[in-house]
Image (tube, helix red, strand yellow):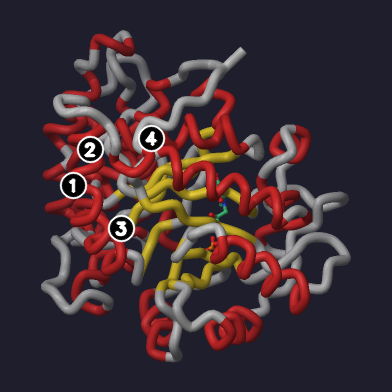
């Protein structure tokens, strides 16, 4: 049986202990996170893997990036530490966990913090069947007390900031009753930052994909939560299609905006100007320069012996939208989609795709 031993509780770890070293830089990271959380790219299974996050980081230095959901059982029972791998260049990057067992989540959060994640986010929004049967994700909106217990355990076990991503409710719950109760419980547990996907999840009858579009968005309710919980950092999520819309939501009083699909499909439109529009710095690089800057990363991935040599398409599938809406984008996308998965495909495929795009644009 697994026995829980808090590894970071009250920073009591001994001198020379790795965990103590990790704990030391967490307060500084929490300031970075606070600023970064003005804009974030949502956790998205199979999409926001480490290759995707590396690409997004080249476009914006400051935007907060989230991992795909990693389940606590996979980490704790499966010891699947490889799921935590990331490149330090991705920082600030937050680990999203799925789970509902406070002890297991605490242990998984400690593993994440040890790996270097400054934020651990608990998924209370994902409606998929697999997640429901494990009794976590959106179904947790029905048990705020359990979520609070999970958050307390995660906070006590390690020094990274614990945050929550939730829906406004599920099924026939009344969001205007459920959401304030949910938030007050997690705030009492010590959570200071939350992301609210501003629509319900229907746990029966809708696919995960439909659950991202069909239940109507209720931004007003999220703004009401900001009135009710002025000290809670609230990011709004759901249906934000442009950086200008994100800016408007911030100007209207939101602390942060999280963008999912639009950031994935149009990374340049959302992220290249983010440092300028959201954080008041300079704009990010031109997408052609981003492609060229990916070369060392791609070549290292292709040569990664630990995985028997990585495949080009693992990385380039996230780059298909880099030129969305620009002349030659179709040629770029087509050449990469057709060639990058072929055995032996290497950097020259990316150069060919750039050339095809430039030719079409000329
Ligand atoms: C392919 C895909 C995978 C997703 N996986 C996760 C996930 O692992 N964890 C999570 O909390 N939300 C997940 N989501 C939901 C997004 O984080 C986000 O809440 C949702 O897409 C709404 O934001 P958007 O309208 O900006 O896309 C996923 C969404 C997509 C499109």
Q: Residues within 10 Å of mark 1 (few under 14, many from 20)?
A: some
Please indicate, yes or no, whether residue 261 appears anywhere in the rendered image.
no
Judged from the image, the secondary structure of the residue bearing numbered disc 3 is loop
Q: CA distance from mark 3 to mark 1?
A: 37 Å
Q: CA distance from mark 2 to mark 4?
A: 11 Å
Q: Nearer the viewer, residue 30 or 198?
A: 30
Q: Residues within 10 Å of mark 2 (few under 14, many from 20)?
A: many
Left or right of 200: which side holds 240? Answer: left
Q: Say which quarter of the image contains residue 271.
A: bottom left
Q: Quadrant of the N terminus?
A: top right
> Which residue is rendered at x = 38% and y = 35% of the image?
112
Q: Does 306 appear above or below 24? A: above
Q: Nearer the viewer, residue 286 or 99?
A: 99
Judged from the image, the secondary structure of the residue bearing numbered disc 4 is helix
Q: Does 294 appear above or below 5? A: below
First in sequence, mark 4 or 1: give its number. Answer: 1
Can you tell which of label 4 and label 1 is closer to the viewer? 1
Residue 25, disc: 1
From the top left corner, tell me how far across and down residue 301 is, in percent. 23, 24
Q: Does 258 appear above or below 5? A: below
Judged from the image, the secondary structure of the residue bearing numbered disc 1 is helix
Can you identify the residue that label 3 sits on? Answer: 323
Residue 22, disc: 2
């Amino acid at each position: 049986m697994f026995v829980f031993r808090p590894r970071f509780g009250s920073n009591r770890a001994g001198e020379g202990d790795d965990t103590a070293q990790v704990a030391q830089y967490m307060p500084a990271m929490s300031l970075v996170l606070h600023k970064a959380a003005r804009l974030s790219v949502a956790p998205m299974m199979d999409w926001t893997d480490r290759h995707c996050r590396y690409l997004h980081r080249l476009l914006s230095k400051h935007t907060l990036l989230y991992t795909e959901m990693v389940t606590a059982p996979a980490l704790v029972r499966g010891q699947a530490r490889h799921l935590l791998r990331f490149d330090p260049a991705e920082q600030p990057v937050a680990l999203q966990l799925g789970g509902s067992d406070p002890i297991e989540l605490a242990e998984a959060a400690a593993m994440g913090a040890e790996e270097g994640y400054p934020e651990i986010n608990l998924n209370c929004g994902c409606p998929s069947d697999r997640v429901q049967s494990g009794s976590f994700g959106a179904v947790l909106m029905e048990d705020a007390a359990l979520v609070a217990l999970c958050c307390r355990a995660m906070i006590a076990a390690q020094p990274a900031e614990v945050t929550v991503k939730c829906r406004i409710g599920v099924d026939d719950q009344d969001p205007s009753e459920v959401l304030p109760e949910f938030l007050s419980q997690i705030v009492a547990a010590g959570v200071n930052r939350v992301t609210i996907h501003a629509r319900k999840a229907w746990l029966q009858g809708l696919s995960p994909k439909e659950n991202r579009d069909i239940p109507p968005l209720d931004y007003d309710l999220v703004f009401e939560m900001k009135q009710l919980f002025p000290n809670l950092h609230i990011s709004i999520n759901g249906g934000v299609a442009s950086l200008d819309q994100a800016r408007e939501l911030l100007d209207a009083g939101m602390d942060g905006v999280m963008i999912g699909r639009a950031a994935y499909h149009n990374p340049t439109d959302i992220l290249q100007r983010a440092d300028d529009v959201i954080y008041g710095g300079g704009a990010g690089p031109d997408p052609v320069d981003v492609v060229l800057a990916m070369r060392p990363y791609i070549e290292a991935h292709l040569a990664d012996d630990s995985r028997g040599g990585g495949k080009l398409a693992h990385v380039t599938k996230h780059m298909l939208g880099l030129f969305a809406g620009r002349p030659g984008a179709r040629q770029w996308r087509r050449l990469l989609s057709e060639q990058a998965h072929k055995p032996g495909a290497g950097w020259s495929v990316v150069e060919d795709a750039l050339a095809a795009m430039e030719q079409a644009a000329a």
